[in-house]
Image (cartoon, helix red, strand yellow):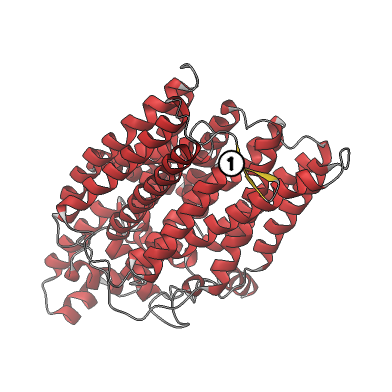
Amino acid sequence: MERARYRQSDLRRMVLGVRAIPSLFIALTSYKLLAVLLFMETFLLPGTFDVGGLAFPACTLLFLACALVCLAFAILFRRLTFHDRGWYLGLLTACLLLGLFLLLLRELGGIGNTALAAACRGLGIALVAMGLIGAHIEEARIMGALGMTQTLTFGVSAAFAASLLYLALTLLPMPQGRWAAAFVLPLVFAASFWRAQQEVYRSPRTRYEEPEAKVLVPYRFIATSVAQGIAAGLLVALACAGGQFSPAWNVAGYLLAAVLTLATMLVCKLDFNRSVYQIGFPLVGLGLLCAGIAGAPLGAPGAVMQVTGFLYLDLVLWGLGSYLIKNCRQPATWVAACPTTSLMAGRTLGAVLGAALLQLLPAGFGWNTLLCAAAFCFVMAALLLSNAANLRTGWGFVRPGGPDDGANAHRACQIVAEDFSLTQREFEVLRRIVEGESRADVAEALFIAPNTVKTHLHSIYAKLDVHNVRDLRAYVDNRRRSFSPSSENEEILENDA
């Protein structure tokens, strides 16, 4: 009964969070739907291109362009200071629209000149990549300002909405409906995201500035992202060779990913190590294993599990990125660009390797099962790269023992205070109450009246949607366990005691 009440409170808090900034919900929904159309459909870049006598999926060019743009952002992130300028969002929108127009012109304009057609495709891909990656990083920045809880709230809500809109798009004529949506979505995103920026950055509590702290290269996280990307790229090669995934499977996968993320938030309190390595990667691997055994990688059960796993990882990693940005004081551009570069590079490599193998291996070799097995091995390799130190080092983004260490109640109180915009005095009251002090002790320590402590406590209750001190301590303890790399060991020791 007590756990059910906590979950109802969390669900209510999520609904209220979305209602507080509806423009951000619209912006994220439009961006996620656009990303699905660009990365999970082939209408934008149909066909293949030839290199050395081998044909490769044309969508590989978009993956490569996104990887290169992300790499540029990651290398130059200290010098890129124009993200808060009013014209920047308009520039990203213009890049997306012009890039889409050039790709549409190349596909439907009947350009007879081969060199001109290639120039339209190349410039169009570059512009789309710049606009899409720039928008991705701006989203990471605003999510870092809001905090992990609201990031996951908006992410799950937008995933639900984007999947339903995608389902509606499947009822429109192909590919006209996709092209129309691709041109409308950047405009919707720009208008709603601009409004969201005004609402979020109006408060000094959520005003974000890139910190000047020294950054580390998260080698383990990069290797994990590359392995994950290669697995996804191998599936892209299979899809392009044997027919792309059914839109219905994409919709089902997106809905299931949103439901799974919501369940993880409400039930597991989003322990990132468990969410990524014990749910996300195994789910993808299970889908690949089923597809390989069946010998039909595009069959419904395996396809849905794969889509669900990859999209679930995407949603969870948005929350992880927000945690690293706000709670570990990492630059948003670095956090967003670094793993995305690795993921896109891995996806490019996987698609190229998969397409080459499909053409070089003899017919009847069983290449469906072979590529599924290869993708499964890469997913398992990404899984084996994890260890218990991920949280203590922020997956390689911060030094061990740095500000990411959430294994104590004080740090958990700081995270809760940041996520729910508690005042400094409310944070001090929260910390002392969580540590076991009475109201009288808190009043004496802070040199304030007991009634003032009571007022602060009621304000904290309202913000966290709890009802008494016991619920408050239980909520903070759950948050502490979510960020503790040794939570399982602690539970064992407590049970033994």
The residue located at (59%, 41%) in the rendering is 308
Q: How many marks?
A: 1
Q: Is residue 61 left or right of residue 192?
A: right
On screen, residue 303 above or below 86: above
Residue 1, image x, y percentages? 48, 45
Q: Nearer the viewer, residue 131 or 256?
A: 131
Residue 357, image x, y percentages? 76, 49
The residue located at (21%, 38%) in the rendering is 191
Residue 65, image x, y percentages? 47, 53
Q: Is residue 29 visible?
A: no
Q: Nearer the viewer, residue 460 or 60?
A: 60
Q: Is residue 6 left or right of residue 250?
A: left
On screen, residue 48 above or below 330: above
Residue 228, image x, y percentages? 61, 56
> Mark 1 belongs to which amino acid?
Thr
The residue located at (40%, 32%) in the rendering is 161
Q: Is residue 304 visible?
A: yes
Q: Is residue 254 left or right of residue 453?
A: right
- Crowd rating for badge 1 (residues with CA inside 10 Å; few <14, some 14–19, many 20+): many
Q: Residue furthest front?
A: 113
On screen, residue 151 above or below 429: above
Quadrant assignment, res 358: top right
Quadrant assignment, res 196: top left
On-image quarter of the C terminus? bottom right
Q: Nearer the viewer, residue 82 or 60?
A: 60
On screen, residue 23 above or below 221: above
Label 1, secondary structure: give it. Answer: helix
Q: Nearer the viewer, residue 429 or 423?
A: 423
Q: Which residue is mark 1?
A: 308
The residue located at (50%, 20%) in the rendering is 174
